[in-house]
Image (tube, rainbow, N blue to C red):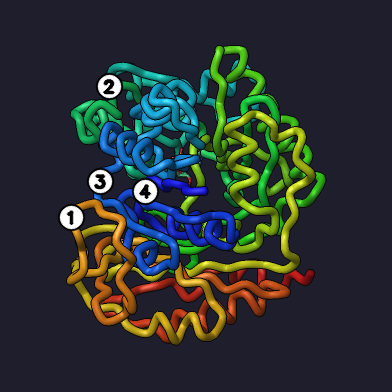
Amino acid sequence: MKILVVGNGGREHAIAWKLLQQARIEQVVCVPGNGGTASLERCQNLFLSVDDFEGIGKFALEHDISLVVVGPELPLAMGITDYLQRQGLMVFGPTRLGAQIEASKAWAKALMQEAGIPTAQAAVFTEAQPAKAYVEAGKVPIVVKADGLAAGKGVTVAATVEEAQSAIDAIFQGQFGNAGKFVLIEECLTGQEVSVLALTDGLTIRPLLPAQDHKRIGESDTGENTGGMGAYAPAPLVTPALMQRIDTEVLQRAIATLRKRGIDYRGVLYAGLMITPEGDFKVLEFNCRFGDPETQVILPLLETPLEDLLLACVEQRLSKLPPITWKTGAACCVVAAAGGYPRDYQKGQAIKGIETAQGLGACVFHAGTKLEARRTEDNSLAPSPHPLTPSLVTDGGRVLGVTGIGQNFESAIALAYGAINQIQFEGMYYRRDIGKRVLSVKF
Ligand code: AMP
Ligand code: GLY
């Protein structure tokens, strides 16, 4: 079986790595992949852009690809699944209509309201003036959101009316392009955020282990928002009883309402939830894909072969599969970022120490890395270049995700930090407090 994975982040490296643990996976092709996917045995990078649907489709048909797994939201929102399905390919990931659950916050909010899914109160505006008046009449803090995809930068949690109003202006003045045609003004929720990712075939939905992400750049959750600086799973905050409620009140309702709208949603439905101090919950957002870095802690704990789950979703037979099984214990992922991220940062710094980190037993997932000298542009399926360390350089803001797995959080966190301490590149930055809040949890 040959599988094509679309994307180039830590998430896609983790997906490829997990798929390749099964001998029956002959080959994984990553489009465009990164330095980590290029270094995996039986894995190949294909240098096409994630929105080159025609190129991806042509390659997949010519090379007998059995399944295409789409990592990022952008190609999903652009309709990669619709396009590839029309070519006769099997695709894991929702169609363009389904991807609206992430690509339009106004659409997702209306769906949640229709479905009776607990979520923050919100109002939608198409012009600045009424939005500003609404803010003035309300309470602060208040949350201002651009409707569309804005690479994680479209949300402002405003402490003052002035801050909220300038966020509204920025959105309507086109800071996020088309993503800013609508603005949502939302009540500000407090508590802890958790990510519940679930697999669905459009009829049945099965949650994966709950995870918690660390979104801010600085320790103790301070500073700017990022794509995610680390994660751990299973999140102890989500007790089995709470997961049961999330399953019934969020996941099942979402799928039922999508179906009511005629949307056959097959892929990951990711609910970002706020767990209130009283132990109740509300949905902050839905994503239409695997989380990053959550995937780097969830997949290392998964025992069921990943391709069985993905294929069951695509073939709409998830209900026939036995329950998903997991390793006992915990996983913690610490992200190594380029100095300056999430603002300007340098690329092209040599990375050292990955093999030593792996030697300690950690999984090192690559995000913004590339093999500098060996990059080929001919899209051939020549063997991956080995060894990779000497020519591996940084190529993005989040560079690596180092995951430790252990019998408990203490050992998982210790392994992740022991391993990341072996890695160096100029300007490397990582948070020292990933998972700290769960250190007392015993298994
Ligand atoms: P979103 O893209 O909607 O998930 O928003 C990005 C981040 O903004 C979330 O992960 C939260 O940290 C924060 N956020 C979003 N909505 C709210 C809200 N209603 N109250 C408080 N924080 C929020
Ligand atoms: N870790 C947050 C996300 O994947 O959206």
Residue for badge 1: 377
**C-beta proximity under 8 Å, tags 3 and 4:** no
Residue 81 position, x and y percent, is: 42, 29
Q: Earlier in the sequence, mark 1 or mark 4?
A: 4
x and y percent of residue 276 in the render?
Answer: 66, 45
Q: CA distance from mark 3 to mark 4?
A: 10 Å
Distance from the alpha carbon under mark 2 to that under mark 3: 39 Å
Q: Quadrant of residue 439?
A: bottom right
The residue that appears at 28% across and 37% down in the rendered structure is: 51
Q: Specify few, some or many for label 4: CA neighbours under 10 Å numbering under 14, 14-19, or 20 or more.
A: many
Give how far apart the Cα atoms at labels 1 and 4 are: 17 Å
Mark 2: C-beta under 8 Å from nearest atom of ligand 1: no
Residue 161 visible, this orientation: no
Residue named by callout 2: 128
Residue 90 lies, with reference to residue 133, above or below; the image says below
Q: Do the residues bearing badges 2 and 1 touch, measured as CB atoms within 8 Å? A: no
Looking at the rendered image, the disc whose residue lies closer to the viewer, 3 or 4, is 3
Q: Is residue 144 visible?
A: yes
Work out how far the residue at label 1 is from the one at label 3, CA to CA, in angstroms.
9 Å
Q: Secondary structure at mark 3?
A: loop
Q: Position of residue 61 (x, y in %)?
A: 37, 36
Check mark 3 vs ligand 2: CB closer than 8 Å? yes or no.
Answer: no
Task: Give whichever of discs 2 and 3 has the lower sequence position.
Answer: 3
Closer to the camera in the image, 273 or 187: 273
- To which quarter of the image does residue 12 belong? bottom left
The reply, left or right, for residue 369 in relation to residue 108 is: left
Amino acid at pointer 3: Leu
- In the depicted view, which residue is nearer to us: 47 or 153? 47
Is residue 104 found left or right of 348 in the rendered image? right
- Residue 343 in the image: above or below residue 149: below
Q: Label 1 is placed on what type of residue?
A: Glu
Residue 28 as seen in the image, left or right of residue 425 = right
